[in-house]
Image (cartoon, rainbow, N blue to C red):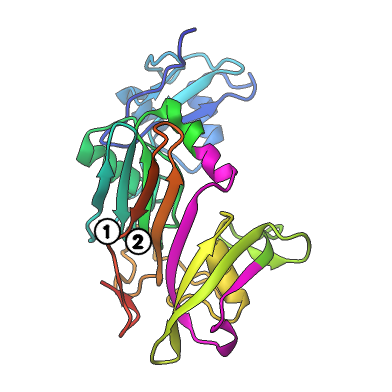
Amino acid sequence: MTEAFVPPPRDGVGASRVGVGDGRFPDVLAFLAARFPAVSEWPERLARGDVLDAQGRPLAAQSPCRLGEQLWYWRDPPPEPRVPFAMEVLHQDEHLVVVDKPHFLAAIPGGRHLRETALVRARQQLGIAELVPMHRLDRETAGVLVFIVQPARRDAYQALLRGRDVHKVYEAVAPWHAELAAPQVLRHRIEKPAGARFMQVRIAPGEPNAETRIEMIERLGDGLAHYRLQPATGRTHQLRVQMEALGAPIANDRIYPRLLPEPPPGVAPDWTRPLQLLAREFAFDDPVTGRRRVFTSRRTLDLTTGLPR
């Protein structure tokens, strides 16, 4: 069986794919203009050969747009501020690449973040175009991030996450509360409210779907504490929303408890105020090699100021 065509990445950035849902468009340009009305440069992109059919052939603006056809294209986002922090490679072999992601660097391309991502940096630095993520970290979270070298192995590794067979340890700086001095297990139901903005979730009534063990490592000054968080599940923003629900939102969180505006496109954030959340450890039994894998971040939190080094 012939494998489906996938364009190679350009400068580490993969192409995007869109399907033609019906046959009412007279040509490719008309479809793209209707599907992506905010983009005005489709004629230029088509002239450059930046839109391909499912077999990898460049399409002209007047090419027929057939029902069910798949098109490949490369996004052209506005300029992205360079994240001024290095990303260390913690481990590399024929199966996995593990990096120590800095704060502010998105894990994978999405939204306004395309080139300034851990995936693109790793592809460019190591020359491995086929890298795919095993899991994700929030852009604001630093620490261990694992990529898979062979895409055919992706399901085997991601099955560990679905089966809760990955041991994850995070650290955070958040307000001190006496009731959090003893270890406890948090169980909540996390949902995205209907009509809510994309990034926000909330604690809701009902059967829990998120579980985290929390323990205090030490009490700090200025009303803060250093916590260890061990999530058994991987819901969106799980640690952030659960800590906020306890009245201890993670220091410098720009989403919980209150959503703060993002800087305008092309404008850098305040690099001096990263979210105080670190993915310290990621461990599992490798489904391909059978070996125990334990990856640990080398980053530290400066517990005297609450800011990471």
Compared to residue 179, the image places residue 69 above or below, namely above
**Residue matched to label 1:** 83
The residue at the point 40 percent across, 46 percent down is: 108
81 sits left or right of 212 in the view: left
Magenta residues? 158-186
Kindly indicate the quadrant of the structure image that contains residue 130. top left
Closer-to-camera residue (130/162): 162
- The tag on residue 104 is 2
Task: List x then y, in percent, for residue 179.
Answer: 60, 86
The residue at the point 39 percent across, 50 percent down is: 107
Task: List x then y, in percent, for residue 247.
Answer: 59, 82
Question: Looking at this rendering, what residue extends furthest in the right direction?
Answer: 206
Q: Amino acid at mark 1?
A: Val
Instruction: State yes or no: discs 2 and 1 in contact (Cβ < 8 Å).
Output: yes
Cα–Cα span, label 2 and label 1: 7 Å
Residue 291 belongs to the span the image colors magenta: no
Residue 164 belongs to the span the image colors magenta: yes
301 sits left or right of 285 in the view: left
